[in-house]
Image (cartoon, helix red, strand yellow):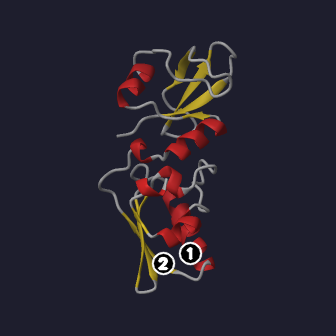
Amino acid sequence: MVSTLPNIDPDLIGILEQVSDPEIPVLSVLDLGVIREAVIRDEVVHIKLTPTYTGCPAMDTISVDLKQALQQNNFKSKIELVLSPAWTTDWLSPKGKAKLEAYGIAPPLGEELDKKALMDGERIVKCTHCQSTNTKVISAFGSTACKALFQCLDCLEPFDYFKCLK
């Protein structure tokens, strides 16, 4: 979905799609929406990178991986960490959300539904194993701070839910 990308030079898209999130390797940095700008100026690729949350440990790895990918394609690079506006799960691409689900992580539902699922216990988060919404929160924090742990009450399997962040 190139048209929904922020200011990204089309010549860089193929390279950026090869750089994965180290915590969720099925997602590229474009799927994740952390690249806010990637332009070529004076033979240098300038990238504006927004962390999913301030202090995210994956940002160092992503920066190194971006530099390596660009260098392998004969580009010099300058990466700038941009904290404002803050990253939001709205920046996940539709392709990224589908990849999350296929990987076994339920994608974010949106702000209001997220609150209903996490705080009110409404059974609206779809199990990534059997697709049932007969699910419950086990823990508001899963394997990382951005995920919650759920369990399906039909197939009894646990799975992560990627929380909505605004």
Left or right? Give the position of 51 relative to 70.
left
In which image quadrant can residue 14 be found?
bottom right
Residue neighbourhood size for the residue with mark 2, other residues' Cα within 10 Å, grouped as few (<14), some (14–19), many (≥20): many
The correct choice, above or below, for 26 with respect to 49 in the image is: above
| Residue 33: percent from left, percent from top | 45, 53
In which image quadrant can residue 101 be found?
top right
The correct choice, above or below, for 44 with respect to 100 in the image is: below
Pick out the residue farthest to the left: 84
Disc 2 residue type (three-letter)? Ser
User: What residue is disc 2 on?
Assistant: 77
Q: Sequence order check: which comes first, mark 2 or mark 1?
A: 1
Disc 1 residue type (three-letter)? Leu
> Residue at left 61%, top 62%?
18
User: What residue is disc 1 on?
Assistant: 70
Q: What kind of element bears circle 1? A: helix
The correct choice, above or below, for 27 with respect to 98 in the image is: below
> Residue at left 60%, top 43%?
99
Q: Are dots 2 and 1 in contact, CB under 8 Å?
A: yes
Quadrant housing the C terminus: top left
